[in-house]
Image (spheres, helix red, strand yellow):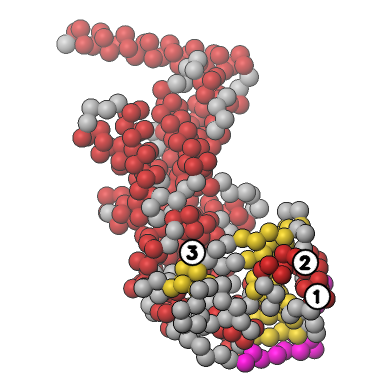
C-alpha cells in the first residue's frame, strides 16, 4: 500500500451550490451530534458527487475521525457491522446512515490490516486523516467531502476536473487498486453508466486481463453487485460494458457459454429482452423481482441441462428437470450465489412450466391457486417471446382461464378434456388400422 498523501483542496461555501436543504435530515442530525461531541464529521462520496452532477442522492454516507466504538456510545440507535471494514449503522426507522472511520495507510505487519498474496485486502481497519482517507477511496469523483463545520467541500485536485469532464478515474495505480478489491472493476462499469461518464484510459486498460480476479470474491457479495448492475435502470448498458471487458462471464458463466455458441442465438435474444425489460420497469418505478430475473435468465441453461440428462439417462422430463435445477444452481452459485429463499421460488416457477401444458383441465383450478402462479405465468409469457411460438396457444388458454368466471372456467377445463380423449381415440384407431 502506497503511503504518499496529498493535501486536499478546500472549496468554500461561496464557491459551490450545495446547501443544507439538499441534505438528508437524519444525516444532518448525525453530523451535528458528532461535531458537537468534538469529532470531525463529513458527508462523503456518492451523495455529494450526485448533488453536484444534478442527480438525486440515494444514500448519505458519513466519514469521521471517531472510532466505531465511539460512534456507538453517541447513538442508542447504532449497530456495528462488518469485519473487513468496521462500520457504524445509525438506524432511523427504514433509513440507515452509514458512518465510517477515516481510513489510513496500512503499516507493515499491522494487526488491523491483512492483504493476501494476490494483493486483495482481506481486513482493513487502519484509521487515519481525511487526506489519507481520500487517497484510499476508489475513484477521484468519490473523493469529495462536505464539512459540516463550515459547509465547505474538500476533495482531490483531480476531482472537480473529472466531474466536469465526466471521467471515471481510479486513484493510484489501477492494477494495484483492482487487485486490492476486484469488485472495483464492476463499480467502474456501474458508475460510468449511472453517471453517463467514460472510463479513463488507464482505468479501463487492465480490466480484461484482471477480470478473472472476480473468481476470488465471495459469491454472496457478487450477488449483491449483480443487483446493483441490473436493477437500477442501466441493465442494458451495464451488460454491454460487462461483456466488452470480459466481466460478464464471471457473473453468468452458464449464460456466457450459450451466448458464445452460434447454436444458441435464442439465449442472446433472451438476454437482450430481459435487460431491456428491466430498464423499462425501473424507469416506471416498478419493484423488480430477483426471482423473476433469475428464473428467466437461467431458463435456457436449464433446458440445455435437461436435454443432456435425458440423452444420458431414462429419466422422465419431471425427474430430469429436478436433477437439472440442482445442477444449475450448484454451478451458478459458484459465481454469484442466489439465496435459498429466492432459489426455492425459482424452482416452483420452473416446475409450473411443465404443468401449464399438461394440466389445461380440471387441475387448472389448483394450479391457479399456487402461490407463485403469477410469476410462473410471467415466465411463460417471456418464453413465447424468445423460445417457441407454439407456446402462444398455451399462454392464451391460461390468460383466458384466469379472466373467466367460474362457469366459463369449468367449461374450458371440460372442453380440453374432451379434446384430449378424442385425440387418444384417434391415435388408437390409426394404430389399429396400420
Q: Nearer the viewer, mark 1 or mark 3?
A: 1
Compared across the picture, whether 195 is left or right of 1 comes to: right
Question: Along the line of sight, which residue is nearer the eye, 20 or 285?
Answer: 20
Residue 57 coordinates in the image, percent (x, y): 69, 67
Residue 77 against residue 14 in the figure, above or below? above
Residue 163 coordinates in the image, percent (x, y): 61, 82
Q: Is 14 one of the magenta-colored residues?
A: yes
Q: Which mark is residue 238?
A: 3
Q: Secondary structure at mark 1?
A: loop
User: Which numbered disc flags the more N-terminal residue, 3 or 2?
Assistant: 2
What distance separates the C-alpha of mark 3 from that of mark 2?
A: 41 Å
Residue 381 against residue 337 in the figure, above or below? above
Q: Circles 2 and 1: CB distance less than 8 Å?
A: yes
Q: Nearer the viewer, mark 3 or mark 2?
A: 2
Residue 328 coordinates in the image, percent (x, y): 36, 44
Question: Along the line of sight, which residue is nearer the eye, 99 or 50?
Answer: 99
Write down the residue under mark 1.
Answer: 37
- Label 3 neighbourhood size at 10 Å, few (<14), some (14-19), many (20+)? many
- Label 2 neighbourhood size at 10 Å, few (<14), some (14-19), many (20+)? few
Question: Along the line of sight, which residue is nearer the eye, 153 or 272?
Answer: 153
At 66% from the left and 68% from the top, the residue drawn is 68
Which image quadrant for residue 32?
A: bottom right
At 54% from the left and 53% from the top, the residue drawn is 278
Q: Is 118 one of the magenta-colored residues?
A: no
What distance separates the C-alpha of mark 2 from that of mark 1?
A: 8 Å
Whether residue 3 is visible, yes or no, is yes
Write down the residue under mark 2.
Answer: 74
What distance separates the C-alpha of mark 1 from that of mark 3?
A: 43 Å
Q: Secondary structure at mark 2?
A: helix
Magenta range is: 7-21
Amino acid at each position: 500500500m502506497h503511503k504518499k498523501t496529498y493535501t486536499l483542496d478546500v472549496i468554500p461555501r461561496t464557491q459551490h451550490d450545495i446547501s443544507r436543504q439538499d441534505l438528508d435530515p437524519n444525516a444532518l442530525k448525525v453530523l451535528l451530534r458528532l461535531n458537537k461531541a468534538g469529532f470531525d464529521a463529513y458527508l462523503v462520496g456518492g451523495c455529494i458527487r450526485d448533488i453536484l452532477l444534478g442527480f438525486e442522492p440515494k444514500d448519505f454516507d458519513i466519514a469521521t475521525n471517531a472510532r466505531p466504538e465511539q460512534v456507538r456510545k453517541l447513538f442508542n440507535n447504532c449497530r456495528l457491522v462488518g469485519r473487513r471494514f468496521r462500520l457504524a449503522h445509525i438506524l432511523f426507522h427504514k433509513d440507515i446512515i452509514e458512518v465510517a472511520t477515516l481510513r489510513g495507510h496500512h503499516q507493515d505487519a499491522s494487526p488491523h490490516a491483512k492483504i493476501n498474496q494476490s494483493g486483495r485486502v482481506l481486513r482493513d481497519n487502519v484509521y487515519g486523516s481525511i487526506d489519507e482517507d481520500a487517497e484510499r477511496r476508489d475513484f477521484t469523483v468519490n473523493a469529495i467531502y462536505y464539512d459540516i463545520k463550515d459547509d465547505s467541500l474538500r476533495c482531490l485536485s483531480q476531482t472537480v476536473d473529472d466531474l466536469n469532464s465526466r471521467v471515471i478515474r481510479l486513484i493510484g495505480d489501477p492494477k494495484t487498486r483492482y487487485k486490492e478489491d476486484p469488485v472495483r472493476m464492476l463499480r467502474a462499469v456501474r458508475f460510468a453508466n449511472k453517471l453517463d461518464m467514460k472510463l479513463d484510459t488507464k482505468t479501463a486498460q487492465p480490466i480484461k486481463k484482471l477480470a478473472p480476479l472476480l473468481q476470488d470474491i465471495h459469491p454472496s457479495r457478487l450477488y449483491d453487485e449483480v443487483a446493483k448492475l441490473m436493477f437500477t435502470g442501466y441493465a442494458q448498458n451495464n451488460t454491454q460494458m460487462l461483456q466488452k471487458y470480459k466481466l460478464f462471464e464471471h457473473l453468468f458463466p452458464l449464460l456466457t457459454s450459450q451466448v458464445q455458441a452460434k447454436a444458441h442465438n435464442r439465449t442472446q435474444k433472451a438476454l437482450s429482452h430481459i435487460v431491456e425489460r428491466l430498464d423499462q420497469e425501473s424507469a416506471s418505478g416498478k419493484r423488480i423481482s430477483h426471482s423473476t430475473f433469475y428464473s428467466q435468465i437461467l431458463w435456457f441453461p436449464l433446458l440445455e441441462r435437461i436435454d443432456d440428462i435425458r440423452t444420458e439417462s431414462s429419466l422422465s422430463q419431471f425427474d430430469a428437470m429436478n436433477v437439472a435445477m440442482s445442477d444449475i444452481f450448484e454451478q451458478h452459485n459458484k459465481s454469484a450465489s442466489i439465496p435459498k429463499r429466492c432459489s426455492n421460488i425459482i424452482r416452483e416457477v420452473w416446475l409450473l412450466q411443465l404443468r401449464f401444458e399438461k394440466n389445461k383441465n380440471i387441475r387448472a383450478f389448483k394450479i391457479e391457486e399456487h402461490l407463485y402462479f403469477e410469476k410462473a405465468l410471467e415466465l411463460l409469457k417471456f418464453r413465447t417471446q424468445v423460445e417457441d411460438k407454439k407456446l402462444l396457444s398455451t399462454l392464451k388458454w391460461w390468460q383466458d382461464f384466469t379472466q373467466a368466471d367460474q362457469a366459463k372456467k369449468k367449461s374450458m377445463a371440460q372442453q380440453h378434456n374432451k379434446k384430449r380423449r378424442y385425440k387418444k381415440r384417434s391415435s388408437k384407431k390409426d394404430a389399429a388400422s396400420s
